[in-house]
């Protein structure tokens, strides 16, 4: 294949079709190009409160948002140390990289961790998790498992856990479901939602979000011995008055404001349906090339695809697909260790519309063609378009 004219993306970096960091809109980037403001000015403080409000609006519930300077992992650690007393029992439900991370984190923090594990690619079982929750203080769970592409049934799991233990604090990693997938923490009895700026919020990395239900807010520990910078009780008190204990990443918050306006320009149901349609289009494109979704209940945040195998067609590895895409200046991802080669991951999370999903289908055709995989040209693009035009 001759090299095509460079796409409309800057040449010094690949197009981002990975589930974070994601493409960022020019308007959001321009918000970062302002002269430095001081975070204690009336204007900056008003903006801070406005953005906190928009973060709750994107959740669709009257939760209280705390903006953490740090990535999603810092936000999760803050939620844990600010809500769970030292040594308490924490149930960790896991079926992939990120959910396993929360178990490891809770162990390091000295909690009594009970792990309820499923193999990667499989779905968590509500009954199994609930059985472990009886005398636990908290449950950590990942809604959209970005490593496997599974959207776990948070609603059913939370209902089962609360049925056996109404006081259990459910801390949900919604890093790639917040602003992407249907999420109703109030109705679902989920207490804490954690996310970060470089996923659906389509802002550069550097901010984490923690959203507390009124009940979770009442359970925040004063002067937690396990955190100073990540003492979110103190943070929330300050942030409600736009008076953060530390210097906030005010420039990123200005940028986030612009990105949130785009997401909030349509009702949440419309946003969720559109992101699902885009991701379904990627899965359909993969399907047309002989791939299959690793999860039977796919998250709308990312298509995690098992490359074609068997029936005379030579096996293609996930790493090979990601490398072929990289050769075309497209940044997708292979699987995460220890499943690097099992799958590849492509995504339109972030600043992308349905026509970007169509482009990714075409990109995928070029990659599979470069890998010598036989298929009918146009099959993936037309499969994607069928989904998108529905
Ligand atoms: C990206 C991600 C995280 C957080 O990662 P950071 O690099 O700390 O922002 C956590 N959970 C899931 C499911 C993710 O996709």
Image: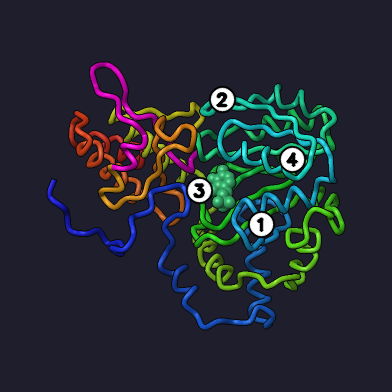
Which residue sits at x=84%, y=55%? 224
Mark 4 packing: few (<14 Cα in 10 Å), some, or many (20+)? Answer: many
Whole-angstrom CA distance, mark 2 to mark 4, is 22 Å
Q: Which residue is mark 2?
A: 119
Mark 1 packing: few (<14 Cα in 10 Å), some, or many (20+)? Answer: some
Give residue 385's mark: none
Position of the N terminus by quadrant: top left
Mark 2 packing: few (<14 Cα in 10 Å), some, or many (20+)? Answer: few
Q: Is mark 1 within 8 Å of ligand 1?
A: no
Whole-angstrom CA distance, mark 4 to mark 1, is 18 Å
Q: Position of residue 242 (x, y in %)?
A: 72, 72
**Residue lying at the far top of the rendered structure:** 311
Which residue sits at x=75%, y=26%? 130
Q: Nearer the viewer, mark 3 or mark 4?
A: 4
Label 1's element? helix
Whole-angstrom CA distance, mark 3 to mark 1, is 17 Å
Q: Is residue 246 visible?
A: yes
Q: Is residue 177 visible?
A: no
Q: Quadrant of residue 167?
A: top right
Q: Name which of mark 3 and mark 4 comes first in the sequence.
A: 4
The stretch of residues the image draws in magenta is: 299-323
Q: Which residue is mark 3?
A: 270
Q: Which residue is mark 1?
A: 56
Q: Name which of mark 3 and mark 2 comes first in the sequence.
A: 2
Position of the C terminus by quadrant: top left
Q: Nearer the viewer, mark 4 or mark 1?
A: 4
Label 2's element? loop
Label 4's element? strand
Whole-angstrom CA distance, mark 3 to mark 2, is 33 Å
246 w.r.t. 353: above or below = below
Q: Name which of mark 4 and mark 1 comes first in the sequence.
A: 1
């Amino acid at each position: 294949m001759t090299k095509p004219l460079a796409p409309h993306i800057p040449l010094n970096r690949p197009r981002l079709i990975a589930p974070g960091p994601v493409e960022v809109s020019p308007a959001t980037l321009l918000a970062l190009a302002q002269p430095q403001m001081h975070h204690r000015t009336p204007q900056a403080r008003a903006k801070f409160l406005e953005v906190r409000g928009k973060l709750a609006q994107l959740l669709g519930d009257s939760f209280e948002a705390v903006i953490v300077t740090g990535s999603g992992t810092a936000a999760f650690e803050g939620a844990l140390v600010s809500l769970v007393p030292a040594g308490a029992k924490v149930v960790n439900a896991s079926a992939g990289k990120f959910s396993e991370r929360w178990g490891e984190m809770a162990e390091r923090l000295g909690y009594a961790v009970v792990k309820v594990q499923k193999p990667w690619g499989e779905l968590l079982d509500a009954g199994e998790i609930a059985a472990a929750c009886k005398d636990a203080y908290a449950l950590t769970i990942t809604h959209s498992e970005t490593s496997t592409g599974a959207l776990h049934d948070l609603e059913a799991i939370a209902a089962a856990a609360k049925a056996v233990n109404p006081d259990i604090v459910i801390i949900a990693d919604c890093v790639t479901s917040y602003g992407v997938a249907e999420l109703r923490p109030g109705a679902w009895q989920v207490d804490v939602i954690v996310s970060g700026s470089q996923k659906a919020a389509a802002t550069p990395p550097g901010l984490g979000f923690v959203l507390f239900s009124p009940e979770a807010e009442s359970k925040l520990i004063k002067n937690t011995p396990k955190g100073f910078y990540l003492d979110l009780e103190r943070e929330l008190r300050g942030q409600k008055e736009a008076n953060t204990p530390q210097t906030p990443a005010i420039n990123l918050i200005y940028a986030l404001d612009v990105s949130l306006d785009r997401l909030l320009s349509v009702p949440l149901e419309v946003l969720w349906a559109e992101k699902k349609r885009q991701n379904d289009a990627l899965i359909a494109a993969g399907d047309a090339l002989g791939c299959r979704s690793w999860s039977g209940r796919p998250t709308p945040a990312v298509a995690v695809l098992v490359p074609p195998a068997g029936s005379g067609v030579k096996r293609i590895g996930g790493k090979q697909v990601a490398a072929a895409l990289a050769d075309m200046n497209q940044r997708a991802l292979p699987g995460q260790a220890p499943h690097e080669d099992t799958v590849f991951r492509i995504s339109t999370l972030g600043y992308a519309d349905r026509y970007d999903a169509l482009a990714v289908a075409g990109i995928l055709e070029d990659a599979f063609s470069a890998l010598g995989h036989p298929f009918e040209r146009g099959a993936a693009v037309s499969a994607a378009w069928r989904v998108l035009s529905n």
